[in-house]
């Protein structure tokens, strides 16, 4: 039924879309070819969706038309059409899907796109999809009919000014019996995309493994299929070349980089399923968006079911690919996926395989593994906290920057322990540089003890679990007591620095406690310091100070009172007990400098500055 109102309705684009289109049109991306891959990929998704919906509603495909994507160049008209007979879009879907971007992180993506030179790479990470067509077309006409409905709609846009939407003309509606026809009115400098060899080249390079037939309809002659149209994951490993995997990765993940790891196998036994998974070699921009979903697609006997079936745990959310089950029922609803015991088994087994593959990569191709670790280590470490069962394996897989200046595995760390060292030491903070100069390292450094320097936000979290590696507990240098007494100093001369000081420890501590009152929970002589005067540490139980601070920033907890550790051999500390007038200022200074060294501000920075000035002037013998 055609609507009587055939007047086109004009609608503006959502601001983000307008901005994106502006960038696509005005920046010069060398890789304009990608538009075709994006449109083919949308067509393939639409065919997947139709096949899925037809399980519950077989009428949708009762016409018996085999699924296909057809590419139709028309030199006379200067147009290139990409046509699919998939699920199609109704009026509202056209407006929503081709007028807005419903993706988290769009703003930050646009900001980066504006700055970046490597536009296509970023576009691949984000998947601008349909809008990429505006790189090659100055006008796009989309005619679409939602499967099972009797209305077709036409959407037209020249980019900038939004789009018009109207019921399709009778001719157009007849031609588009189901699915979507996208007609690109090519720009003058994009006319090469009308050449059949160009089209075949692009399909071959980017879309060969789309599992539906892609047909090229030359201006004369019958349409012919130009891709191999088989589900690559169902083919045997021996038939496939590295290039095949790269292409499959790029088309499945919508990416442009190389896969750093490929895992392709078939599980047989209680359950049969094919697995084709990839680890990217670059970090997607939205890795830490809270709404980012997993990216492993679930198929059942080659029918696409869902792309957010939680097939891998959150800490492997960078892995992309496909799992195709032979046993799950085809009519499994997306809601049922959550508690399905068969899926839970698959998830467990595949998670184990992915970790096993990462382990063997770390051993056999350490450079490739390092690439993956550098991009995704901060995500994998979430698993140390979340996945109790695999904690040990994940710890072993982890690489840490240490005071040795290298990135090391705990295994290497454990092989280089100092005599009598029974613990693995670490320090959490926000930058390696700042951590390196943290006084809490002094005593460890004097003994040549290696310390892990942890600077990812997630480090504050996983370290809050009680952990050990090979029987050696992990221990924070900013929490609880440390006792290096049995570990020899590197340089005997340094022993002098560690000799007990002459100052009266009890008296000094009493004075400082009196001044600082309830700003701290305790004052004690430090085993950690050799040259600095003071530092702040957390109590032996409870949270590390780095985690506390992080949680407090997010209003998820209060900061508890720290312990002030003082270096009894430091002249400033030694001076306190004997001082009447300056004892108060010196005590406050010990607290405040410890705060600054931890990257915090003193509670009252102005008072701190004037106190410091006073002390300096007094030291210079000037009156204040
Ligand atoms: P993406 O494919 O990454 O979601 P696009 O901008 O390419 O982003 O497309 C936006 C949405 O428009 C798609 O999610 C889909 O719902 C719809 N769409 C695009 N092309 C088609 C098509 N050929 N058939 C049906 N729906 C489509």
Image: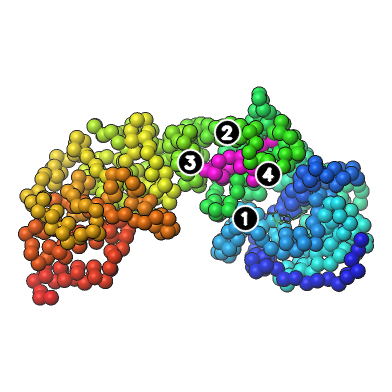
Of residues 56 and 449, the one drawn nearer to the viewer in this rendering:
56
If you read the primary sequence from the N terminus, does the residue marked by circle 3 or circle 2 appear first? 2
Magenta segment includes 310:
yes
Residue at the farthest bottom position: 623
Q: Residue at x 21, y 72 (%)?
A: 610
- The residue located at (74%, 35%) in the rendering is 329
* Secondary structure type for disc 3: helix
Answer with the quarter of the image where residue 55 lies: top right
Residue corresponding to mark 3:
386
Residue 478 x, y percent position in the rendering: 29, 48
- Of marks 4 and 3, which one's residue comes earlier in the chain? 4
Task: Report how far apart the C-alphas of labels 4 and 2 lie in the structure.
Answer: 19 Å
> Mark 1 Cα within 10 Å, few/some/many (few <14, many 20+)?
many
Locate the N terminus and report the quarter of the image it occupies: bottom right
Q: Going by the picture, which residue comes out furthest to the front?
A: 518
Taking 490 as reference, is 132 left or right? right
User: Which mark is on residue 335?
Assistant: 4
- The magenta span reads 307-324
Is the CB atom of the residue marked by disc 1 within 8 angstroms of ligand 1's nearest atom? Answer: no
Q: Is residue 36 visible to the viewer in this orientation of the structure?
A: no
Label 4 vs label 3, nearer the camera: 4
Residue 387 visible to an observer of this rendering: yes
Place of residue 282 in the rendered image (x, y in percent of width and height, measured from the top left): 55, 48
Residue at the spot of label 2 = 348
Residue 520 x/y as whole percent: 24, 56
Q: Secondary structure at mark 2?
A: helix
Q: Could you tell which of marks 3 and 1 lies nearer the N-terminus?
A: 1
Q: Secondary structure at mark 4?
A: loop
In terms of sequence position, does the residue under pointer 4 or pointer 1 come before the other? Answer: 1
**Percent x, y of residue 36:** 74, 53
Circle nearer the viewer, 1 or 2:
2
């Amino acid at each position: 039924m055609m609507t009587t109102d055939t007047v086109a309705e004009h609608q503006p684009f959502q601001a983000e879309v307008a901005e994106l289109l502006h960038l696509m049109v005005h920046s010069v991306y060398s890789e304009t070819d990608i538009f075709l891959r994006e449109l083919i990929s949308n067509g393939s998704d639409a065919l997947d969706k139709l096949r899925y919906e037809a399980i519950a509603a077989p009428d949708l495909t009762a016409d018996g038309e085999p699924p296909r994507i057809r590419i139709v160049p028309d030199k006379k008209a200067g147009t290139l059409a990409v046509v699919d007979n998939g699920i199609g879009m109704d009026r509202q879907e056209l407006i929503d899907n081709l007028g807005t971007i419903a993706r988290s992180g769009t703003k930050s993506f646009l900001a980066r796109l504006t700055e970046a030179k490597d536009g296509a790479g970023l576009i691949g990470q984000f998947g601008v999809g349909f809008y990429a067509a505006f790189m090659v077309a100055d006008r796009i006409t989309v005619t679409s009919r939602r499967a099972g409905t009797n209305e077709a709609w036409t959407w037209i846009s020249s980019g900038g000014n939004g789009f018009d939407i109207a019921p399709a003309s009778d001719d157009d509606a007849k031609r588009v019996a189901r699915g979507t026809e996208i007609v690109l009115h090519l720009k003058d400098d994009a006319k090469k995309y009308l050449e059949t060899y160009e089209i075949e080249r692009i399909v071959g390079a980017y879309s060969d493994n789309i599992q539906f037939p892609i047909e090229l309809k030359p201006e004369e002659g019958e349409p012919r299929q130009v891709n191999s149209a088989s589900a690559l994951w169902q083919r045997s490993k021996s038939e496939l070349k590295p290039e095949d995997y790269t292409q499959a990765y790029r088309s499945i993940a919508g990416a442009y980089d190389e896969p750093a790891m490929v895992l392709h196998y078939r599980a047989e036994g209680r359950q049969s399923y094919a697995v084709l998974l990839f680890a990217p070699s670059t970090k997607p921009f939205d890795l830490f968006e809270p709404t980012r979903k997993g990216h492993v697609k679930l198929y059942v006997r080659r029918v696409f079911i869902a792309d957010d079936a939680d097939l891998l745990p959150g800490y492997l959310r960078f892995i992309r690919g496909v799992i195709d089950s032979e046993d799950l029922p085809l009519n499994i609803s997306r809601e049922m996926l959550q508690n399905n015991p068969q899926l839970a088994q698959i998830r467990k087994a595949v998670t184990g395989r992915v970790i096993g593959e990462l382990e063997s990569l770390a051993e056999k191709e350490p450079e490739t593994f390092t690439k993956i670790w550098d991009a995704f280590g901060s995500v994998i470490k979430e698993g140390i906290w979340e996945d109790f069962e695999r904690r040990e394996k994940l710890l072993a897989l982890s690489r840490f920057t240490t005071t040795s200046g290298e990135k090391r595995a705990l295994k290497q760390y454990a092989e280089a322990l100092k005599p009598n060292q029974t613990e693995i030491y670490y320090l959490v903070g926000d930058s390696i540089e700042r951590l390196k100069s943290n006084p809490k390292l002094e005593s460890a450094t004097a003994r040549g003890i290696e310390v892990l320097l942890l600077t990812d936000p997630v480090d504050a979290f996983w370290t809050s679990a009680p952990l050990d590696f090979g029987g050696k507990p992990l221990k924070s240098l900013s929490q609880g007591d440390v006792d290096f007494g049995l570990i020899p100093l590197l340089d005997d001369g340094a022993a002098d620095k560690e000799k007990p000081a002459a100052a009266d420890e009890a008296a000094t501590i009493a004075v400082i406690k009196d001044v600082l009152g309830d700003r701290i929970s305790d004052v004690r002589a430090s085993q950690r310091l050799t040259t600095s005067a003071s530092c702040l540490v957390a109590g032996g139980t409870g949270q590390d100070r780095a985690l506390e601070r992080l949680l407090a920033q997010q209003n998820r907890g209060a900061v508890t009172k720290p312990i002030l550790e003082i270096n009894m051999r430091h002249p400033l500390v030694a001076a306190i007990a004997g001082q009447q007038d300056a004892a108060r200022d010196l005590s406050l200074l010990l607290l405040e400098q410890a705060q600054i060294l931890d990257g915090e501000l003193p509670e009252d920075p102005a008072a701190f500055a004037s106190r410091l000035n006073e002390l300096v002037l007094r030291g210079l013998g000037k009156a204040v």
